[in-house]
Every structure is written in structure tokens, then in C-alpha cells.
Amino acid sequence: MPDAHATTTTAYRRLPGRQWLRMTGRQRLYLGPDHILVVETHYMSEECVRFYFRDIHAITVVRTGGWAAWNVVLATAAALVALLALAASGGLAIFVWAVAGVFAAALVANLLPGPTCSCRIRTVVSERRLSAVERLRQADRLIAILHPLIEAAQATPP
Amino acid sequence: MPINGVPIACPNCGAALPDERVDQPRLGRCEICGRAVRVVTFPLLRVGYVPGRAGESLQADGEASCFYHPHKRAAVPCDACGRFLCSLCDVELGRRHLCPACVEAELCGPRAPDAAPSSGVPGRRFLYDSLALTLAVWPLLIWPTTLVTAPMAVFVALRHWRSAGGVIARTKARMTAALALAGVQLAGWAVLLYRWIY
């Protein structure tokens, strides 16, 4: 017997943007035939909102300071722990070096994806933050994909 | 840049952006707040749309219309499915604005996929695979509770095995992991009880 909760049969393609799992949930973006699907997972429930190409006014991107701030915090922490490791000896030194390595790895993981941003999509009657798009590179890729589709949808009369 | 008399505002501070800051391929700095911003506009913005009130009729081609009444001007999006609604179709439940279909879905349960218009995506779904995995994992912190929660996890996983588990198709990995973990817990309890009795 077919299930009443069956997944939609619409073909969706994953759009750029991946948000780390947070206490507030996680957002993912998909490209449908004539709309963007925003899926927000709140642990045990899932909500979706569609933004039809024909209704989109604008996409805005603002560079935020999170990238630089985290770089400073992680670099400082890694440097301080490395200094402690230099002063330590024996098994303790190995442990402290490992902690410094964790901070260094986190620094690299934050550094490589590039600057952070806040991306919003505006329709005629609403505005929503695309929290899945956290990096400028992701926003550029997203706009490069969506721009021609939205222009084409709005160029043709409904 | 005023488009149809409406200036394009900086998304950070709200100040009007000059022409050269709009529709640029790269970030530009807002002269007021100094933040690097990029605004990409689309043809619809040039129509100069104003949200409708009390089921207003469309005034011009290209205006956003109500999903259910194509000749009425959209006033608000449905908070569940995102469809545009005119004031006649807007049902306010608490602080939420819902369309009649989503109100019906909330009152009567999720609709069948073929009953939903357009792309057939329902607004909200419960993820039974996450529930099963939660029942199998978290009670391990207070392990005696697994005597109750492990059978519950198995029941949820088997009962909802064929449920799609989300708007976008999800794998059965969570269900399988929940079943495996709960199975191990039940086997452990069986061994423990056997040794206790005999």
C-alpha cells in the first residue's frame, strides 16, 4: 500500500551551501524545476518552503566578520597552547601538542572555505535568510546557478 | 539606484545604495555602514510591487498573484509551504499565516502527495528515522532505560520503515542503525535476564 507520507516525486538537485548541524537545526537548499526548495531540519521534524523563480525580487549577500574573528581566536589559541607545549615535557607535552594540533586543524578548516557571509532571498512579500549559505564562495556559486533561471522565468509571461 | 521609484537598500544598514553598487558581479562597500555587500535584482523588482490588501485585484502584468486566486494580488506567503496568498486566503493561526491547504493538513494530518498542488511538496514532516535513532542512542547514557526504549526503537523503525522520512528522499541508514543498536541492546538484556534467572 502506498504510504501517505511518501516523498515527493519532483526531481531536486542539491544547491551549493551546507550548514553544520546546530542546536537550532540545519538548512539545505535544492533546485526544483521552477523553484528553490529550502528544507530546514529541526532534529525530528522537517519544514520546507518553496521560492518560485517568478516571485523572487532579489538575492542579497553581506560579508560578515565571523571568518576573521574565528581565525584570530583559533590562531591565538593554537599559538598559546603551542607555547605551553614547548614548556611541557614527557607525556604531558604530547597531550598539549595534540591539543594545539586540534586548534590548528580548526584554523585551517575555517581558513580554507573563505570569508563568511549572510545571504538572503527576497520575494515580493517575504524575506528569508539562507543560513545554509555561510561562505562567499557558496553565495557566488548559488547566484551563478540561480541568476539565469530566475531571469528566464521572469522574462516569460505567466 | 531607484527602481520604479523605490531605492535599493543596503541589506545591512538599510541605506539607499548608489547605482554602481547594485547588480555587480562582486561585493561592493556600502558608503554608510562600510560593509561589503552584493545585491542581485531581478526583473520583477522593476514592476514596483506593493503587497495587496483585502483581496485586491492585480493592477499590472507581472505582479505576484495569489496561488489560489490568480487575479488577486499576493499579500503574504504561507508560513508552511511558501505559496503566495491574497488576503482572502490568508488564515491566521496564532502568529502564523497559513493557506487553506496547510490548515487542513495541520488539522487532518499530512495530505497524500497526489493531493498537494504544484510540485507536491508538503510543508512539514516528522522524521521517524531520527526518532528511532534517538530512542536507540540517547538512553544508553542511563542504560537501564534501554529495557523500555530499545523495543520502542525497534517498533518505530519497523512501523515506519516504508515512510519516506523526509521531503527529500533519505537513506535507510538511520533506520538500519537504530534497528542494529536496539537489537544489540535487546540481545544484551536477554543474556542478562537468562543469567539472572538460571
Image (cartoon, coloured by chain):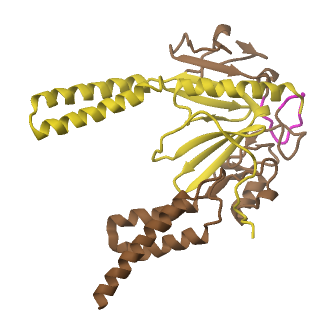
The colour with which the image depicts chain A is yellow
**Left or right relative to B115: residue A136:** left
The N terminus of chain B appears in which quarter of the rendering? top right
Instruction: Please state the horizontal and vertical placement of residue A51, each as a whole percent of the image.
Output: 72, 38
Q: Quadrant of residue B14?
A: top right
Determine the residue positioned at 44% across, 25% down.
Answer: A112
Instruction: Please state the horizontal and vertical placement of residue A64, each as a whole percent of the image.
Output: 48, 24
Which residues lie in the magenta part? B50-63
Residue B58 part of the magenta segment: yes
Instruction: Please state the horizontal and vertical placement of residue A128, each as a whole percent of the image.
Output: 63, 36
Q: Nearer the viewer, residue A97 or B150?
A: A97
Q: Quadrant of residue B84?
A: top right
Q: Relative to residue B32, is residue B127 depicted above or below?
A: below
The colour with which the image depicts chain B is brown
Determine the residue positioned at 86% across, 38% down.
Answer: B56
Q: Relative to residue B139, is residue A20 depicted above or below?
A: above
**Left or right relative to A75: residue A87:** left
Q: Nearer the viewer, residue A138 or A46?
A: A138
Residue B164 part of the magenta segment: no
